[in-house]
Amino acid sequence: MNDPTLSADEFVEELKQEIAVFPKLRINHPFVKAVCDGAATMDQVRTWAVQDYQFRCAVPRIALLRYVACSDPEFAPKLFEVAEEETRGLLPGSSGHPDMFVEFAEAIGLTRADLEHATLLPATAAHLYFAELVIHTHPWFVVMAAQMGAEGTFGPAAAALGRGFIESYGMAPESVRFFTVHVEADEEHGTLAEDIGRRYLTSPALQQQTREVMFRRMELLYDIWTL
């Protein structure tokens, strides 16, 4: 670990191995297990949903900020596609990812007002601040490569949650489509993060920055789900 001679390709491969054994992977979170086992109470699910939504509704703005920061003509169109995908729900008559999460929330007894006027718990606020702060304080490619451990690890947890809500709570598949659409979408975003890392993370300093940003985000994302 932290070998100063690592090439960008070698670093990305090493980082993937570190991600796989990181103790705070969301797929291994007790809340995910509780949902899959049907052991989480609806009050717990609603509390979790209110906090998780706070980042979901911020993603369109964050995706646009990441796109604007990108200076690479090859990767910029791909980041624009991500931004377009995340901001789709801002258009009249359209449904974006935050809207899909609202559909889920309404199916478990929450209202949009419950989501939009919630009090942020410390972990939720910390992650929101950090996710935007790093865009302004780190190279764009460090921020994007760090997505390997953020969006890149959400797919398995999303799949487990979607399956758990259907099988253990009797929810209709259309009510949990937020989770099912993220299985493939976030895997694609994780692959984009790897490609950016392979292109740009060519020095020990940049590799260390990426590692620090990524694992901090993974910790914060995990802590948001700790009720």
Image (cartoon, helix red, strand yellow):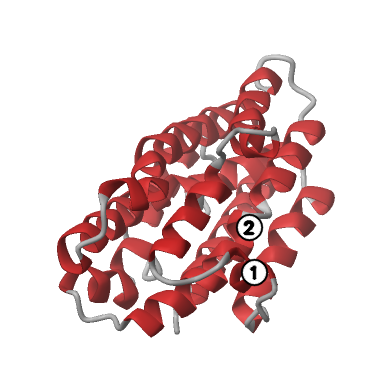
Find the residue positioned furthest to the top: 74
The correct choice, above or below, for 26 with respect to 65 in the image is below
Q: Label 2 amino acid?
A: Val
Question: Residue 109, image x and y in percent?
Answer: 43, 72
Disc 2 residue crowd, few under 14, some 14–19, many 20+, Cα 10 Å? many
Q: Is residue 176 left or right of residue 92?
A: left
Q: Identify the residue under disc 1.
A: 113
Task: Using the image, tell me which numbered label, if any, was put on residue 213.
Answer: 2
The correct choice, above or below, for 31 with respect to 170 in the image is below
Compare residues 90 and 62 and report the one nearer the observer: 90
| Residue located at (40% from left, 69% from top) | 24
Q: Is residue 178 left or right of residue 99?
A: left
State which tag comes first along the sequence, 2 or 1.
Answer: 1
- Secondary structure of the residue carrying numbered label 2: helix
| Residue located at (53% from left, 66% from top) | 52
Question: Residue 143, image x and y in percent?
Answer: 67, 46
Disc 1 residue crowd, few under 14, some 14–19, many 20+, Cα 10 Å? few
Question: Residue 203, image x and y in percent?
Answer: 66, 39
Task: Using the image, tell me which numbered label, if any, was put on residue 212.
Answer: none
Residue 203 showing in the rendered view: no
| Residue located at (64% from left, 55% from top) | 57
